[in-house]
Image (tube, grey):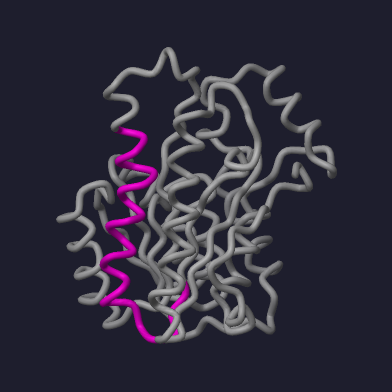
Amino acid sequence: MAHQNKLHSLRIIIERTPQCLHYHGKVAIVTGSSRGIGADIAKALAGAGAKVIINYVQDSAAAESVRRDISRAGGECRVVQADVSDPAQVQQLFETTLDYFKQIDILVNNAGILLFKEIADVQDEEFDQCVDVNFKSVFYTLREAAVRLADHGRIVNISSTVTRVMMPKYGVYAATKAAVEQLTRIFAREVGKRGITANAILPGPVDTELFRTGKTGADIERMAAMAALGRIGETDDIAQVVLFLVSDEGRWITGQAIGVNGGII
């Protein structure tokens, strides 16, 4: 039954992919794509015809599950383990992708961790880890993409709506994501001459394991009530926006930080 439900969910993602958008022949790296938002982005891209690299750090079983779902639906993908907070492993991730598929057209920086603590309670090692995974990883992948991404390539960095609000306990997390947004804007100017676009999207609350970490039911209900549409997001809400931004139809959008949050702000 669980297997059938997963395939049903994947079919929904594929069926909802706009048929006018074309990804056949494109190669995409999606960091942190063994679960949550990243997994649905990988599935949506593969369902639309792209060849996808599923990246993970520790949970090989989860990554393999995503690979099976994509393969059963007729998509093409590979699983590559790499800690994107390590520059040497980022370089290897790009090299392995080129070995498999000979080109890289799309980069989605989704890998991230949530730190939900008041600033006074944050330990040094927690701060360093949040900066490493949420910000340095994006810098390292953009540096590789600057020389390895194909002309007219597409980059989407996952930020967060918390950069636009003042929410207690999100200080360090929000700061790392705000840094990603500014890095995205400047990178877009630097690579624009090659026809490459780079954008950040800012999800609001999305129903994932990462989002629910450290929150009570009351916390989640309060956040859902903040949205004009009266709910927290689903992973496919984010995946569909990514699909548009990396398509040919998204070619005139670059250097932007786009809220994808159901109208929170």
Q: Is residue 10 left or right of residue 12?
A: left
Residue at screen point 78% across, 34% down: 226
Q: For residue 140: magenta?
A: yes
Q: Main secondary structure of the magenta part?
A: helix
Q: For residue 168: magenta?
A: no
Q: Which of the pair 137/14 is nearer the observer? A: 137
The correct choice, above or below, for 14 with respect to 223 in the image is below
Horizontal and vertical percent for residue 116? 50, 24
Horizontal and vertical percent for residue 175? 47, 38
Q: Is residue 34 left or right of residue 90?
A: right
Q: Is residue 207 left or right of residue 34?
A: right
Looking at the rendered image, the quarter that the N terminus falls into is top right
The correct choice, above or below, for 10 with respect to 235 in the image is below
Q: Residue furthest left?
A: 88
Q: Which of the pair 62/107 is nearer the observer? A: 107
- Where on the picture, by quarter, is residue 211? top right
Residue at screen point 31% across, 48% down: 136
Residue at screen point 43% across, 73% down: 106
Q: Which of the pair 12/196 is nearer the observer? A: 196
The correct choice, above or below, for 110 with respect to 13 in the image is above
Number of callouts:
0
Horizontal and vertical percent for residue 193? 42, 86
- Where on the picture, by quarter, is residue 97? bottom left
Looking at the rendered image, the quarter that the C terminus falls into is top right
The correct choice, above or below, for 95 with respect to 222 in the image is below
Magenta range: 129-154
Q: Is residue 223 left or right of residue 191?
A: right
Q: Which of the pair 34/76 is nearer the observer? A: 34
Horizontal and vertical percent for residue 187? 41, 67
